Image (cartoon, grey):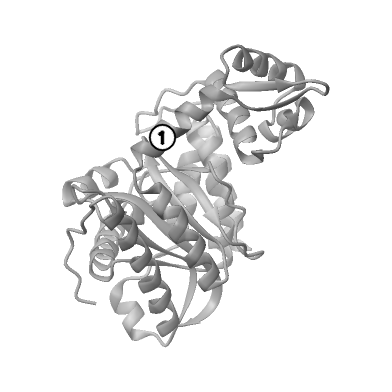
Amino acid sequence: MQIWNECFQFWNNDRKLSRVAPSTVAPARRSPPTARVAHVLAALTESAPEALSLAAVARHARLSASTCLGILTELAAAEWVVRRDPGPTYSLGPAAVVVGQAAQRSHAGLAEARRQLATVAEDLGGLCTVAGVVDAHIVVLDRAGHDPSAPLVATGTRYPFAAPIGVMFAAWHDDAYVRAWIERATIDLDRRRVARTLDVVASCRTLGWMAERLTDAERTLHELLPLAGDDPNDAVWRAVARAAELFGDRDYVLEEIEASARCSVSVVTAPAFDAEGRPDLWLSAYVMHPSVPTRRVRAIGERLRAAADHVSASVGGRDPWKRSA
């Protein structure tokens, strides 16, 4: 309980400080009107193929009915949304289909990733996701399986991608990319934290997968991350980053896995690569168990790595990192 008192104290302090002092990190320019449109489209995407009423869209997008109606009317005029009477109800339109097809082409391995995801989720009997990096966000592109103990991770969920959050999405890039990711940190990272992060990066490249610890604080951090992705207030990002820092060393390094008979594991992740050897998609399994035999953790990691290798191969991708484990 004490750790959460500290966490939310950080959160409240950040909100107060944001009104009296500039951030040490230049915030990205945000557009609340654009965010409202994105929330409407996300609500319709999540419900597809089921059409939604105005009230349902407004509820999912957290907008007033009048604001939501104005957005839906404009989207329908541009064929992003189809309005169906009587009702009326709303669903995604042909313009959204075209954009969706273009987005899938930009992640050429996504179709194979979906196939692999379904198989892995069935094999492991739990929730699995595939994610990518879009600008400054980690975006959940699809999910398969179910686990009532796992966080409510929906397709389209966005997380901020800045150190110390998202090391698994930086680790398999080259060293320059990792350094740039660390330099974009929304909070000051001390020398020990940077060294620890680089150790995690080295372990990721050796193993070909990464495991995160599971604690009560980690569970709640997973619940906070989507809120940070949607909130236009840059202070929220900093507060969540501070919370992640407060929770300690969240990611296992190779030596810790080798020295333990059992591990507390929240998520295991493995990357798929494009033809240039760059990580493009990340497959994750939500384990969410406080005591997992190390051999089981390795088996999950290797299963995800094998699935990710299939995704890489489907686009002529290659893994540039030599692994000895």
Q: Residue at x 56, y 62 (%)?
A: 127
Left or right: 98, with 152 as reference point: left
Q: Residue at x 24, y 60 (%)?
A: 198
In the picture, which quadrant includes the C terminus? bottom left
- Element under label 1? helix
Name the residue nearer the viewer: 27 or 96: 96
124, above or below 35, in the image: below
User: Which residue does the numbered mark 1 point to in the structure image?
Assistant: 103
The single residue placed furthest to the bottom in the displayed view is 261
For the question of whether residue 186 can be seen, the reply is no
| Occupied quadrant, residue 254 | bottom left
Instruction: Point out residue 49 in the picture as x, y percentages from the top left corner.
Output: 65, 38
| Occupied quadrant, residue 39 | top right
Q: The disc labelled 1 sits on which kind of residue?
A: Ala
Q: Residue at x 47, y 33 (%)?
A: 100
For the question of whether residue 192 can be seen, the reply is yes
Name the residue nearer the viewer: 307 or 42: 307
| Occupied quadrant, residue 248 | bottom left
Q: Residues within 10 Å of mark 1 (few under 14, many from 20)?
A: few
Left or right: 70, with 127 as reference point: right
In the picture, which quadrant includes the N terminus? bottom right
205, above or below 93, in the image: below
